[in-house]
Image (tube, coloured by chain):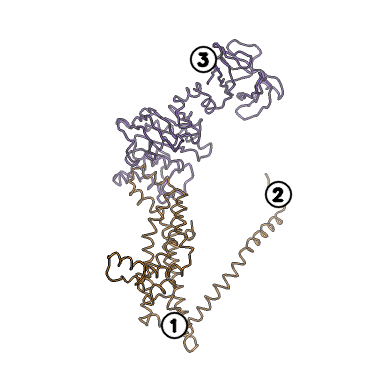
Chain colours: A purple, B orange
Amino acid sequence: MENSSLNISIKNVTKKYDEFYALKDISLDITSGEFMTLLGPSGSGKTTLLMVLAGFTNPDYGSVKFGEEEVILKPPHLRGIGMVFQNYALFPHMTVEQNVGYPQKLRGVSKAETSRTVDQALETVKLGGLGHRRVDELSGGQRQRVALARAIVFKPKILLMDEPLSALDKKLREEMQIELRQLHDTLNMTTVYVTHDQKEALTMSDRITVINGGELMQLGTPNEIYEHPENGFIADFIGESTLLPVQVKNSKATIGKTEINVAQPLDKDGNFSLVVRPEKVFLAPSKKKKDENYFNGTLLDSIFQGESQLLVIELESAGGEAQELRVRIPNQSVTDKALPAIGEKVTIALKVADSYVVS
Amino acid sequence: MSLTTNNINQNELRKLAAREGYTFFGLTVPYLIMVTALIAIPVGWLFYLSFIGRDGTFSFENYERMWKSKAYIKIFITTFKISILTTIICAAIGYPLAYFMSQLSRKWANICMIGVLIPFWTSLLVRTYAWLVLLQKKGLLNNIAIDMGLISEPIKFVHNTTGTLIGMVHIMLPFLILPLYANMRAIDKDCMKAASSLGATPSRAFWTVFLPLSLPGLLAGLLIVFVLCLGFYVTPAILGGGKVIMAAMKISSNIELYFSWGAASALGVVLLVVTGIILFIASKLVSIDQLGSR
């Protein structure tokens, strides 16, 4: 089988607008065939980085290599990438077929071959038989698929996607996430995917690059990023979490006056934060165990959310500000035992193995 | 839920809807009165007059004269020639300018737009006479060219087709640029990026994506310019110096010199019908709501 993808090597890419860094010394290696997500809040620079890869934005300096080839000076039309835009950017004056066939026409592919590859691409994105439709007759989801078909019809080795699902409703978006991922696994193109939706990033990616303020914050698999965020920003941005202030002194961590045990070695003194995710904490059993940390508080609110019950608990203040903590109790069965009533005192537990502090 | 036989409040709600309908219709009344008084009645009167002969009875003589008299045929040819040339030159100058403006940031585009609009807001007469001052035999342009030794004899810029065209293009240009620019602004910039990422060179992307998408605006602009040119009076009258006679000028002379309302009306009716036909054909090419600004 021919090699259908290329690795991407980004080095020291920097882009400055006046005094503002859109990208600050970004270096990043994306392996061949990988699904890499650039994740960050809006204005973080993730789209700028994608535009640098596509060739629409030139950085002040830095290098971008596709395989062994330096492409930073190449105009977009010579980079041979497939790209899917946020608002699809379909050509409104062309039919679905003409849109998908456009890159083939540019490449001088014969009519018969174009028609075959267009049908194949439309089949791949499950739009077989819709080739003669006009673009404005399609739904948002279908347009997205056309844009995708157009980007893959010429079998590019690299596929770039700029928040392609953000305009779709939640249900369709979640379906498309799985589908895009499966499509990537079939086609095996190196894919760079930009999103601000952390859940989407976790669902789809091989690895995630978290970008904020033009800087690379963390690079890792979804699991690594979720379970071991490198700092408070990432812990807060990825998934739901409450950060409890922790003081570390002589390798001992305390919240207020209570000592807690944590999963990682503590070799530095100072102020840290304990990452508490709602699904990792639970109502403490009556018998306390050694491998769990406990927090006392009062139940402020209890919200039924279908698949789970969300408890909002105000922790007993340990000096300082009152802290709210969220606990998600899965709705496993109608026979689940009754939950505490609002206003009751509760004790919640977090396993030491799940107790992770960040700076 | 079962359907109740007793539809609660149905009649009252219908009345409410009807009342809202009347209220909105009421908003169109001033316009309808104006259109009736200022357009429907005069045009009807014009139509009637065109069928009244010299002796005051019903006759086709006003129309017969038009295709029998060489002078009239020449006027129609001149009118169409000047209109077509003006339209083509406007497109040749206006399209690149509108394209340039559409690629600028809003701020700079607005500054350019002011440059387009200031002449547009200046009196037609002022601009026409300004051209006369610049272009006449001892005008600014000829004087400078002679002083610089570029020419020995003054070039005849005005009182001919050239002068008429220069003036008309200048006056018509905004009518082409405004709808075209609005159309170009509305083109999704990502479409050009998409074309480029799919492998299109900049010029290929322009011809295959941008140009087709800007056609509705271009057609609207061409149409407005052409239709306005057909009935144009002031500029050809002044810059043509009586040597370039267009339909509107003939209408005027029929009334002012020959007091022939019948002949003038017939010419007016023909102009109206021709414009109507052009609009009809254009509406088949572009949906009519795109002829306004889009």
- Say whether residue A42 is left or right of residue B240: right
Judge if badges 3 and 1 mark residues of a common chain. no
Q: Secondary structure at mark 2?
A: loop
Q: Residues within 10 Å of mark 3 (few under 14, many from 20)?
A: few
- The residue that mark 3 highlights is A268
Looking at the rendered structure, the secondary structure element under dot 1 is helix
Between B47 and B217, the one nearer to me in the picture: B217
> For the residues marked 3 and 2, what is the alpha-carbon distance in whole angstroms?
75 Å
User: Is residue B81 at all visible to an observer of this figure?
Assistant: no
Q: Residues within 10 Å of mark 1 (few under 14, many from 20)?
A: many
Q: Nearer the viewer, residue B267 or B286?
A: B267
| Residue at the image point whose x is 49% and y is 60% from the top | B292
Q: Which residue is mark 1?
A: B62
Furthest residue to the front? B147
Subunit ID for the residue under disc 1 = B
Q: In the picture, residue A100 is in which quadrant?
A: top left
**From the viewer's perspective, is residue A232 above or below residue B138?**
above
Percent coordinates x, y for residue B75 in the rendering:
38, 77
Determine the image quadrant of residue A298: top right
Residue B143 vs residue A214: left or right? left
User: Residue A235: x percent and y percent?
Assistant: 53, 25
Q: Quadrant of residue A208?
A: top left
Where does residue A167 sit, x and y in percent of width and height? 50, 41
Which is closer to the viewer, label 3 or label 1? 3
Both on one chain, marks 2 and 1?
Answer: yes
Residue located beneath label 2 in the image: B4
| A15 on left or right of A106 | right
- Report in which chain the residue with disc 3 lies: A
Kind of residue sitting beneath label 2: Thr
